[in-house]
Image: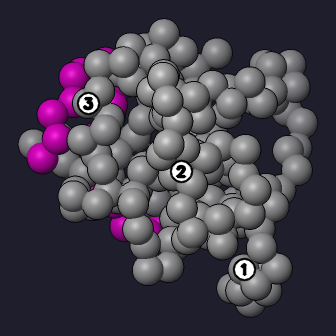
Amino acid sequence: MAYNLFYPASLLPHKNHRLLRDPELLGYFFQNEIKVFLTIDSNQFLSEPGGSLVCLGRLDRDACISFLRQSDGLLFLSEFESLGLPLIEAASARKPVISFDLPYSRELLGDSPYYIQHDFRGDNPICCALTNFLSDQPTPRQSALVRDALPISTVWSCFLNAI
């Protein structure tokens, strides 16, 4: 079963697109049939035709929301955020989020099982978080079932209900 992850982020250094170039991670994507869709132009970030990284170019807000809803989850490699809108949008769309275990993501997502641990020793920490994500995904037979919402902190639940 193939998996599509969405990473809506501009090509700024703290968004960590460079981590996607890691050979171990690229091999993991290939082995597990994961495609990562990026909202950057292919001339900014070389992607291989038919490869695991797909550059969509800049998308407007509606297209981003639509793409997020069609994806299997959000991959978010940013080291810091002022608000974390993609995390909020993914949580409101009931999509799993794979992100670094940082204060902003903890505030928005609570105890998400898909945190990338900075201090992890050994295997690639992004691969470890993705392994947790893949192990929780429904089998093709279960895919028609509705997943429970990811936990969101009470403060952000009020915010999401208002929009």
Q: Position of residue 137 (x, y in %)?
A: 75, 29
Q: Which residue is mark 3?
A: 21
Q: Nearer the viewer, residue 26 or 103?
A: 103
The CA span between labels 2 and 1 is: 17 Å
Q: Counting residues from the N terminus, which is met first, the one under dot 2 or under dot 1?
A: 2
**Location of residue 73 by image quarter:** top right
Residues in magenta? 44-62
Q: Residue at x 22, y 23 (%)?
A: 48
Q: Which residue is mark 1?
A: 156
Crowding near pointer 3: few (<14 within 10 Å), some, many (20+)? some
Q: Residue at x 77, y 30 (%)?
A: 136
Which disc is residue 104 wearing?
none
Q: Position of residue 96 (x, y in %)?
A: 68, 47
Q: Counting residues from the N terminus, which is met first, the one under dot 1 or under dot 3?
A: 3
Q: Is residue 21 left or right of residue 124?
A: left
Q: In which quadrant will I find the C terminus?
A: bottom right
Q: Which residue is mark 2?
A: 99
Which residue lies most toward the bottom here?
Answer: 162
